[in-house]
Image (cartoon, rainbow, N blue to C red):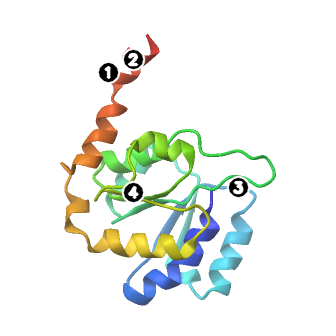
Amino acid sequence: KGHEHLIRALPLVAAELPGAELSLVGEGSELDRLKSLAEDLGVGERVRFLGALPHREIPPLLSGHHVYVQPSVKDPRTAQEESCGVALLEALAVGLPAVITDSPGMMETVSFESSASVRIVRRGSHFELAAAILETAADEAAFRIDEPGRVAALRKHSAENQVRELL
């Protein structure tokens, strides 16, 4: 999922936003390596590794944050890429602005290059991630629930549209 790049971006973000923290949801084979990386970079106390959570806990968790970041990458071993941005849509639905990478599934989810509510950066660049996070956090328009980019992405993936496309 590219979380390594997000952890590498955190010291850069924290240099500008001293209260910056990161919450990571999920488990997997990379967990120990990511925890070690956070410690090595001096941001271990800023990263909360929450493990797997029941879906019902995700919307309230998202609502308590300021920016959603999904730094998806192409898996070098399997060539697997992000196929659908469901988590991104969940973040947009609760009103979070987002920073995503140019992974095909993410790009298809939003269907635009960037907006106030969603900033898209090149995969694998923690420098670009950090810059986009800082830009998003400073942009008041990104936090408007009626921001056109957010509305367009959610409308495109509404239940009605999904049923229509399936039929």
Tag of residue 160: 1
For marks 1 and 3, the one nearer the N-term is 3
Q: Quadrant of the C terminus?
A: top left
Q: Nearer the viewer, residue 22 or 85?
A: 85
List the residue tagged with mark 2: 163
Mark 4 or 2, closer to the camera: 2
Measured in 3D between alpha carbons, the distance from the residue under mark 3 to the one under mark 4, in whole angstroms, is 20 Å
The CA distance from mark 2 to mark 1 is 5 Å
Helix, strand or loop under label 3: loop
How far is disc 4 from disc 2 in space, using C-alphas? Answer: 28 Å
Pinpoint residue 41: horizontal percent, then vertical percent.
62, 86
* Tag 2–tag 1 contact (CB < 8 Å): yes
Q: Which badge, 3 or 4, is on the more N-terminal residue?
A: 3
Residue at 58 percent of width and 61 percent of height: 123
Q: Considering only vertical position in the picture, is 36 above or below 94?
A: below
Horizontally, is 128 left or right of 98 in the view? right
Q: Under tag 4, what secondary structure?
A: helix
**Residue bearing the label numbered 4:** 61
Amino acid type of the residue tagged 2 in the rendering:
Val
Residue 42, image x and y in percent?
59, 88
Q: Callout 3, which amino acid?
A: Gly
